[in-house]
Structures are given as C-alpha cells and as structure tokens.
Amino acid sequence: MAVSDRKVTHLGEAVGLSDEQLVEMYRLVALARAVDERMWVLNRAGRIPFVISGQGHEGAQVGIAWALEKGKDWIAPFYRSIATCLTFGMSARDIMTAQYATAGDPSSGGRQMPGHYGSHEHNLVSVSSPVATQLLHAVGIALAAKIRKTGEVALTIMGEGSSNQGDVHEGLNFAAIHKLPFVFVVENNGYAISVPASMQLSVTDVADRASGYGIPGVVVDGSDVLACYKASKEAVARARAGDGPTLIEAKVTRLTGHSSDDQQSKYRSEEELVAGKGQDPLPRFREQLATAGILTKAIEARLEAEISAVVDDATEYGESQPDPQPSTAMKWVYGEDWPSETPPPWGFGASDEPH
Amino acid sequence: MPAKTFIEAIREGLAEEMRRDDSVIVLGEDVGKKGGVFLTTDGLWEEFGGDRVIDTPLTESMIVGASIGAAVNGLRPVAEIQFADFIHPAFNQIVSEAARMRYRSNNGYCVPMTIRAPYGGGVHGALYHSQSVEAFFTHVPGLKVVVPSTPYDAKGLLRSAVRDDDPVLFFEHKKMYRSVRGDVPDGEYVVPLGRAAVTRPGTQLSVIAYGLMAHYALEAADRVADEGISVEVVDLRTLRPLDKETLLDSVRKTGKCLVVYEDNRFGGYGAEISAIVAEEAFDYLDGPVVRVAGPDVPAVPYNHVLEEWFMVNPEKIADSIRKLAAY
C-alpha cells in the first residue's frame, strides 16, 4: 500500500497538477463522451440531421487544452473539438444548441453545420469546413500577440489528413521564421474519412515534418491524458517564452465513423476496429486515476450522475430553443446593413413595385 | 491643393493611417526595405520598422490567412498581393474565411482587413501581370470591393478601407500609378465606401465605369461631345456594396446605359450592372444595355499588337457610345 500511496502523491505532481485538477480533467473527458454519445442517439432518433464526432480524441483534447490559459490564450479548433471547446469554457448546452442549430447557438446562431464550434467569449475561433485554413488564423493571432506584446499563445488543431494542405506548410514556415507563440496540434487518428494514413503521408509521423521548419516535433500517445498535457505544457511554455512554435502529434483512435453519414466498416476491418477500442482514452484515464486513488468510487458515482443530468439538461435545452427566423438571415453579412445594395432574390428591384 | 500621382496618394494614405493607428500593419512580398515592386510602400519600413511592415515569404494564402487571424486579434492588417494575378492561391482564405467569418459566427467575429492588389493591363504584363479579378470577389457577399480611379479617391477610399470592420479588396490599376495625377488635399479626409460619383454630367447616355476605364470613359465622352452627344459618366468607385441609387438615377435620367470594364466580357462585373439596370430601370430605357469589355480570351496576350487588340480604349468606347446614342 505504501507504493500506491506514493503514486497518489506523484501522479499529478510530476506534471504539476493537483488531484482536484485531475478529477476535473476526467470530468471533461467523460462529459465530452457523454455529449457525443447523446448526439448519435438524437441523430438515429431523427432529432438532429448530422453528427461529427470526437470519440477517441477526448483525452488528447483535454490534456492539450488544459495547458493553455483560459480567457487569455486562443484556440482555432476543428470539427472534432468537442472536448477542446468544453475545456476552454463552452458548456454542454453550447455544444447541443449547435446540433439543433438554434437561434441562440453561440457558435453560429444556427448558420453552420454541427461541429463548427466557435466562441468569441472563449477565444475559440469560428471554423469553416475547408480543412486546415484555421492554421493560418492561429498563426495570425500569434503574430498579433507578438506585435502587441500581449503574452498570448495561439494553438490550432486538425487531423493528419488536413495536415497535408498547403496552408499548413505556408503557416508553419512563417510561424517558425518569426518564432511566433504558436502551437500546432495534429490529432492523428489514422484516417482521412476513408483513406488510411499510409495513403496520405509519406512518413509515419507527421511530427517528422517539423524538422523541415526547424521546430520541435513531438509524438505523444493521445490516449494518455497526462502525456498530452505534459507535451502541451512544454510547447506552450516555449511559445510564451518567445522560442517559437512546436508541432505536437497525438496518436488517437477514431471510435466512430467519420460522421453520421459514414459506415467505417466498409473500409476498416473488424480486428482494427476492436484494436481501436483498446486505445480509448476514457477507460484508460479512469483506471489511471482510480489506481492512484484519486478517482474514488464515490467521486465517480457523483460525476456520473452529474454528467447524466448535464447532458439531459443540454438536450432538453437544445430541443426547446427556437429556430432562427428568416427575417434575421440577412443580418451580419457586413457590420452595417446595406439594404439598397441587396434586395431579396425574388421579384423586382427593392426600390420599384412590379408593374 | 498639391497634385500627386495615384501611387503617391496611396502611399501617403497608408503612412498616415499607420501614424494614426498603431494597430495598422502592412504585410506582403517585398513590401519592406524594397518598398514594394511598384514602390507603393516605399519608406514605410524605415518609418514603422519590421514589426509593422513585414516582408513575407511567397505565400499568398498565408498573407491573407494570417491577416485574418491578426485582424481577429486586434490588428488592422493591410495585406499586399504583389499582382492581382497572384491572388488566386488566397482565394479560399478570402472567400471561405474572410468573407464568411462575421456571418458564420453570427457577428461573433469580424475581419477588419484590407487586401491591396495592383490589377489591369496595358503595361506589357501579359497573361499573369494584367488580370482584372474583381468579378471573382464582387460575387461574394461579405466582401467589399473598391476600385479607385483618382489620387483623391484612392487616398480617401484607402483610409475608409483600413478603418472598415469588414474585409475590403482594394484594386489599384497599375497603369495609373504614375500616369494619373490629381489634386490631393493636405490633412485628413475620407471618401466613404459604397458611394459612386458622377464625374461628368450629361443628358443622353450614361457610361458606367471604374478604375482606368473611368478615365477612358471621360476621354470618350469628350470625343463624342464635339459630335453633339451628351454623355454622363458614373465612376462606381466601390463595386460592392454598390451605390445603386446613383447608378439608377443616372440611367433613369438619360435612358441609355453603356457599361465599360476591362475584364473579360462574359460573367464580368459589368454583367451584374447590366442586369440591375435591366431589372430596375426597364421602363426608362430607350435602348439596349450595352457592354464594352475585354474579349473572352483567358488573359491579356504579351505582344503589343495583341495587347492593344485586347484592351478597351477611349476610341472603342466612343464607337459604342455613337452606336447606342443613335439607337
């Protein structure tokens, strides 16, 4: 018992985390999973038209985002970033209103597909569907942070498939030249929709590409929350100190199809899918914290009940919120209205009655 | 008022905005020590330093994409694309990202960024140093597109663009940089976006133009004036948001509309002007809405005979004015 007692003390201490912080990190991983699973249930029940999932990525997302300073630093996320957004301040209701595309959905007011999370309040940059474009936005945020001397760090995240885009090369090169306070995270789940990494990458590790920019490239086990946190903490410290960007590649598993419109058994073997479940970060983190005596049965039961209530509340909230009205659909094309410039696309011109 | 060249007015506008507001930065290829390939940014690097006047790698998508991020985080970037012909690698960042950021975030984020780019032919620039690219961008809600024709407007519109909270594309006809001079007052003034100007009043026919073509339209109007044709010239200045009121007021007054643009005719910006006039001033028209535009070849050929064949010029405009006036 003496040995495990020492573990209790040392599990978080080695990376500078308290037991309370570890429990909170676990809560976020578990909450993200529960929200995500609810989304699939709602989709299969015909309540929401589309799901894009983060299942399997949550451990890396929480560990990495935890190293940033909430309310100060910036994240340009991607479509699997549910746990990232929850860690950075968005709520389960915020995520769920995006699924229902409600008027009050903070990501886009119901304008974007689910998965395109963003929040100015939480320094989460609005994301589009063309992949990897957000890397340049994070680089620009880091450039502004450096010029304005704000001490902020900007981090962006995408999959290994997206990492092949030209914007990644252009952005990493620039960020490295100017030693910008920037962190590039690749959540490598081995698949770009259906295409395996072996057909996307000429190297095994995306991190190898870092050397081409003269920056550190780190590979980390994405199911190991604390290893992800440690890698991110070092990268963030390096960025904040003015030593430039780091590329972190977290090897994760994709537990679901690409989206609710994808059947991954068509292109992945049963053995592979079973093996993928072995890399699920949620049971691994749970066991790690339980073994260390941090996550007691009582705490686990409390969290389970709490998360279940939060997900139910978010679902009911999403269901009950109004749709955006067509009368608002012309708003925010520009900062100001230009009513004479763009009449509605029907009938005659805005200024003339039909003759 | 001192007379200045088109390029001097732009340079002054940039320098004054940078003095006025620390959040204004300039970035692009060769914009630093060299001062830009046309010397538009000459002297800015010396005055404002390398933090605010940044020589970038040859990466147009990065220039725009990083400007979007910098704009999100409190700066007002003025990105230079060395030639409008090279803007296409940045198309996704401009159209998918900058244009949609405000709309897609339901006003959570905006992108106060200006993209400057020299455009246009008639300078022996061939296929890749002569293009007019405005129609690609005027098609996109969320973008503002400005094409000034005088030094006064260039400076005043550039100031408005820099101060605007939405992305503005600012296209400068490179042939005008040193060939066009005009009065530019000392001291601060702005020309608001979204306002056209009637640069020559007339009664029989409206010519709608912008950029270099606004000058050629005035020259053509002079030529036909001796023949007794009274032409009104409208210089649009901002292509989007469009000042429809000035456009339609002019056409309703004259009853005839000739649209002039240097870009290829098919699907060009002037096609939209023609459609608006046809839809909203039909009852006032005494003739077809006519376009004078570049021929539908991929771009301006290099050989000087071919280049002259491509370019719209005052005589081609005058010919069309005569035909339409006689209709």
Image (cartoon, coloured by chain):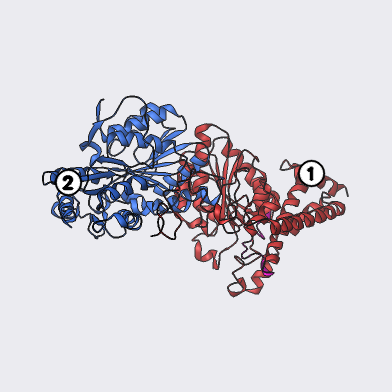
Chain colours: A red, B blue
Return the x and y of residue B43 as percentages of the image width and height. 33, 29
Which sits in the foreground, A102 or A160? A102
- Prevailing secondary structure of the magenta residues: loop
| Residue at 26% in and 35% down | B6
- The label on residue B186 is none
- Which quadrant of the structure image shows residue B281? bottom left
Q: Is residue A233 left or right of residue B288?
A: right
The amino acid type, in three-letter code, at marker 2 is: Ala
Residue picked out by circle 2: B220
Q: Residue furthest left?
A: B227
- Which quadrant of the structure image shows residue B151? top left
Find numbered disc 1 in the image and state the secondary structure of the residue it sits on.
helix
- The label on residue A20 is 1
Return the x and y of residue B124 as percentages of the image width and height. 19, 48
Residue A287 in sight here = no
| Residue at 49% in and 40% down | B71
The chain holding disc 1 is A
Q: Is residue A249 left or right of residue B185?
A: right
Q: Residue furthest front?
A: A355
The amino acid type, in three-letter code, at marker 1 is: Glu
Question: Which stretch is magenta?
Answer: A43-58
Return the x and y of residue A295 as percentages of the image width and height. 82, 51
**Whether residue A272 is situated above or below residue B29 in the rendered picture:** below
Q: How many marks?
A: 2
